Image: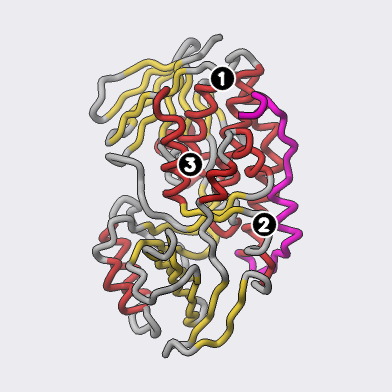
Amino acid sequence: MRNRNVLISGASVTGLALAHWLQHAGFRPTVMERAPELRRGGQAIDIRGAALHIMERMGLLDEIRAMKTGIRGMSFVDGQGEELTRSTEATLTGGLIDNDDVEVMRDDLTSLLFDVGHSGAEYLFGDVITSITQDDDAVDVGFRHAPPRRFDLVIGADGLHSGVRRLAFGPESEYIHFLGSYLAIFSVKNYLDLDHWQMYHTAGDSLVGIYSARQNAEARAMLMFPSAELDYSHRDIEQQKTILAGRFAGVGWETPRLLASMWDAPDFYFDSMSQVRLDHWSNGRVVLVGDAGYCASPRSGQGTSLALVGAYVLVGELANSQGDHGVAFARYQQAMREYVRENQQLAQDRADGKTATPADTAHAANAITLENYFGHG
């Protein structure tokens, strides 16, 4: 098979799923990750619709179901912590807990994907791609630390601020579309003794929340606020924490305690609610998957599912075309385009204040017909 040596940028859900399927199809993947190890933390994520079929085909559906967060419901409270409303799994607005979707913690999923697929892939942690130069036969890749190497194909699975996209497609300002708000997630102690429960407080248009994780052994704080687009560095964590502290100063309930915990959180995440929109997800021998190519934003609730489905379809098309990347990349985009459009529209509607029904979510989650490229397992 042609084009067997493949570099994946990003040990994300996308990158780890790509590594699994590439090995399954007879390719030799190398995964490069900026962080020194698998990234920890992150929010509870949903696997639904077509993505559940992908997990079944990976042979991981039972493991995923065993990792479910088991969240039973949520409460909204006022600034003094007095409960205003309560919703259980049977009555939660939209019915999004009591259905076939599987909600897991992001880092539990990445750990599982790494465990089942790392033995046949090469991993380069703590490095960054600095240059991409391609010709008709291969791609020359420069790294910050490792010696330059030559690969048959390069896949950008490195998220909203993809370095591969910047090097191969141009500056991110040409492709990122801001949806009007910012989101922060970080781990905290489950000091409220939440039992598979979520609590939220609204302050104007802003939202502060905390929910239990990992069988109540810990919790995640979530803060979201609307804003005009901010000028900040997505690599400067201290600057981001300062922005968040300023934006939520004076907000009641548990907000001061959560902000105090934020400064020492080892897994702090902060970013805009934004989408990535490109006309083409490939350029020569370089292709984008997941958030790097078509981020729908957390408002869609479909980022993980887009990643899992995108990885499966891309590798399946590479296998079907015997490694002919031009044919495979075109078929990958054709197969995924409507699925991506539906899920980006779902997020855009929510950003515009429109209510998405359970039927809307289910429709977007299943807006693709999956070919069985590899068989089951």
Q: What SS does tag 3 mark? A: helix
Instruction: Check if mark 1's residue and mark 3's residue have beta carbons within 8 Å.
Output: no
In this view, 345 is above or below 313: below
Which quadrant would the C terminus be assigned to in this image?
Answer: top right
Image coords of residue 54 (percent x, y): 62, 37
Image coords of residue 310 (percent x, y): 59, 36
- Describe residue 277's horizontal placement relative to residue 247 as left or right: right
Which quadrant would the N terminus be assigned to in this image?
Answer: top right
Residue 217 can be seen, yes or no: yes
Q: Is-magenta flag for residue 369?
A: yes
Upstream in sequence: badge 3 or badge 2: 3
The kind of residue tagged 1 is Ala
Q: CA distance from mark 3 to mark 2?
A: 21 Å
Q: What SS does tag 2 mark? A: helix
Q: Which residues are magenta?
A: 351-377
The kind of residue tagged 3 is Val
The kind of residue tagged 2 is Leu
- Residue drawn at (63%, 43%), measured in percent from left and top? 51
Disc 1 or disc 2, which is closer to the eye? 1
Instruction: Check if mark 1's residue and mark 2's residue have beta carbons within 8 Å.
Output: no
Image coords of residue 268 (percent x, y): 33, 58
- Describe residue 254's horizontal placement relative to residue 97 as left or right: left
- Residue drawn at (49%, 65%), measured in percent from left and top? 181
Residue 226 can be seen, yes or no: no
Q: Which residue is mark 1?
A: 25
In this view, 256 is above or below 27: below
Graded by Cα atoms within 10 Å as few (under 14), some (14 to 19) or many (20 or more), the crowding at tag 3 reads: many
Q: Which residue is mark 3?
A: 13
Upstream in sequence: badge 1 or badge 3: 3
